[in-house]
Structures are given as structure tokens and as C-alpha cells.
Image (spheres, rainbow, N blue to C red):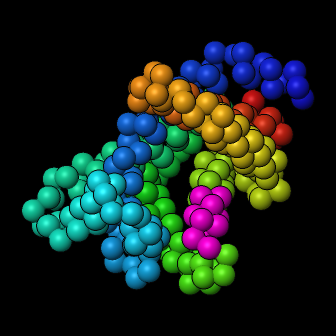
Amino acid sequence: MFKYFYKLITDNKVPTLASGIAFNIILNGGAFLFLYIIVSRYFDNSLINQLVSRLEDGDLKDLFEYFIDYQNNINYSFFLIITSIYSASSLYYHFINVIELLTKRSYKINISKRLISVIITFVFLIGLNIISVILIEIIGNRVGFRIVIVLVIILLVLLILFVINSYSIKSFKIKKIWKGILFSLFYLFIFSIGFMMYLRVFSNFKVIYGVLSFIFIFCFYIYSICIGILIGICINVRNNLII
């Protein structure tokens, strides 16, 4: 198994595809966040509203409030909404293409991949808001707001891993894809802890090298977790004898 992991990491395919996914996350992630903030406006006690209420007065709070209030002018920004939907849906659209390249298999779909990506994007936007509201209502006052954020992130990651792994297996069952999902989740958990520890230990790097150093490190972090996601997919593909 370790030999298999080493081959995946040293092979050009996984690192190259991971870099493409990381680029699209960095490029199009802002559009997804923008749409999430707009959708959250229609949910009482949403995660965004709770976050803004807990922010201290300053530029960051003003920025969040600006995006939240922007939906009041949605009729005057139709082009921005359409381009944001297209950009946000590109995340899953490129994931589909990457999985097909990784598994060396094309899947026949009755409707276009772009339309599927748009539908998946809206499902994620609405589902994430519903999950966050339920968690805030049920356990928000008991365990604290930070725990709610962590739980929302974990559930979102699990949902994303399930969707992309289920697509990688033609006739999938939960028992056929759980190994790869658990590996990717454990990989993301360990690597995220290491990333946060690095930022905490070397907190003075921003003073020495400036803001650009954080951007480079953050991009490397996104690239690294994309490798973990693709390795998890490869594990499921290998276990199901697709390649």
C-alpha cells in the first residue's frame, strides 16, 4: 500500500491534476463564497449573519456587511450573478473532467456536465445554509459558535468527498467508496492541523516576508489537500478494479 501511495505522489498525473484543481479553487472559490453570502440572506439565523454579529467593528465587518446587503441590488447586477454562477459551477465541472482523466474513463450523461455542475452548486449552496442553521439552532448555544463552524466544515468536506468519489465509481455503493473518503478526510485533517501549527509557530513570517508569503503558503496548502483528495479517489478506483 505504501508503495502504491509513493507511486501516486511521484507520478506526474496526480500532482499535475491536483495543481489544476487547486488553481480552479483559488480562482473560482470567491464566486462560490459570494453566492453563499447572497443565499444565506434568505435564511434566518444563518452562519454568515452569526459571523457578522460576532465580528468586531472594522474593515472586515464592513466588507461582510457590504456583500450581505448587496442582494438588495440584485436586479441591477444580473450579469454579475450569472458570471458568479458560471464561475462557482466550474469547481465541480473541472472536478468531473479531472476524475475522468484520472480513471481513464468517460461517463455518458444525458445532460451536459455544465448543467450538472450548476445544479450541484445550488444544492451545495442551499444545503450548506440549511445544515448551518440546524446546527446553530440545535447546538449553537450549548457548545459555542466555533464548534458549529468546525462541524459545518467537516460536513461540507464529507459531502464534497462523497459526491466526487461516487462519480468516480460507475456503480457505487457506500461500502465501496468509504475507504477513499476516510483516507482523504484523515489526510485533510492531519495536513490542516500541521498547516495551522506552522502558522502559529512561524507567526512572524508575515512581518519578515510580507503578505505575499502567506499567499504562497496558502496556495501550497490548497495544492496539497487536492493531492489527498485525488489519492482517495485512486484508492476507491483501485479497490473497485476500474484501473
Q: Where is residue 170 in the image (x, y as percent from the top left)?
A: 67, 47
Nearer to the camera, 243 or 19: 19
For the C terminus, give its image quadrant. top right
| Image quarter of residue 137 | bottom right
Q: Where is residue 104 in the image (x, y as percent from the top left)?
A: 63, 29
For the N terminus, give its image quadrant. top right
Please provide the residue range marked out in magenta.
144-154
Identify whether 96 is placed above or below 171. above
Identify whether 199 is placed above or below 2. below
Q: Where is residue 77 in the image (x, y as percent from the top left)?
A: 14, 58
Q: Residue sitting at 60 percent across and 65 percent down?
A: 146
Q: Residue sitting at 83 percent across and 56 percent down?
A: 175
Residue reaching furthest left?
Answer: 76
| Image quarter of residue 53 | bottom left
Q: Residue sitting at 74 percent across and 23 percent down?
A: 8
The majority secondary structure of the magenta stretch comes to: helix
Identify whether 27 is placed above or below 20. below
The answer to whether residue 60 is visible is yes
The answer to whether residue 184 is visible is no
Identify whether 13 is placed above or below 28. above
Q: Determine whether, in the image, residue 202 is placed left or right of residue 111.
A: right
Q: Is residue 43 magenta?
A: no
Nearer to the camera, 157 or 206: 206
